[in-house]
Amino acid sequence: MKPIPGRSETCNAMADILNRIVDKWSVMIVGYLGRKTMRFNELRHTIGGISQRMLTLTLRNLERDGLVTRTVYPEIPPRVEYQLTELGRTLTDPLDELWNWAARHMHSVNEARANYDR
């Protein structure tokens, strides 16, 4: 992420981390990997609507940030599995709370949007 002029180094770093963990694909991947270790195509089919390229990019970024590990098994064909790291598992409770909040309030938000759009 490119630093924003006038923003402190800490603020730029926090914005970068928050952008990664609240991205919709990251949230879904962390949510599913919080339940079990998964292979690439299993993740892609479970999530639905995510392109192969976007899943690859998101998994790489999560791996780079230390939230996901990628394990390649030397088989033919190669088997690759993804799982949350210990750090990644610390995200599951806060993300579950956000998910639950959205589920509890989606009708109110939709109603507010409809009222605003009128």
Image (cartoon, grey):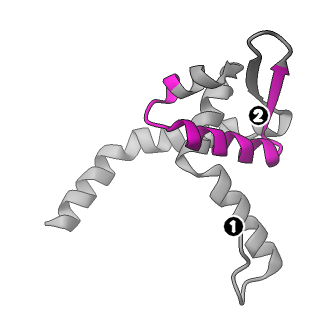
Instruction: Give the left or right position of residue 19, taking residue 51 as reference.
Output: right
Question: Residue at 61% across / 27% down in the picture?
Answer: 32
Which residue is drawn at the image coordinates 49% and 37% (left, top)? Answer: 50
What residue do we see at 44% from left, 44% from top?
A: 102
Task: Find the magenta span and give its range.
Answer: 45-72
What is the crowding at mark 1: few (fewer than 14 residues within 10 Å), some, or many (at least 20)? some
Q: Is residue 50 left or right of residue 94?
A: left
Query: Residue 36: which quarter of the image?
Result: top right
Q: Is residue 55 left or right of residue 79?
A: left
Question: Foreground: 87 or 56?
Answer: 56
Q: Residue furthest top?
A: 76
Spot the residue most to the left.
118
Residue to which mark 1 is pinned: 15
Under mark 1, the amino acid is: Ala
Given the image, on which type of amino acid does mark 2 rest? Answer: Arg
Label 1 element class: helix
Q: Is residue 49 above or below residue 74?
A: below
For image coordinates 57% across by 43% down, the residue present is: 54
Closer to the N terminus: mark 2 or mark 1? 1
What's the mark number on residue 114?
none
Q: Position of residue 2 (x, y in %)?
A: 71, 74
Q: Which residue is mark 2?
A: 89
In the displayed structure, 60 sits above or below 34; it is below
Residue 77 vertical position relative to residue 17 in the rendered view, above or below: above
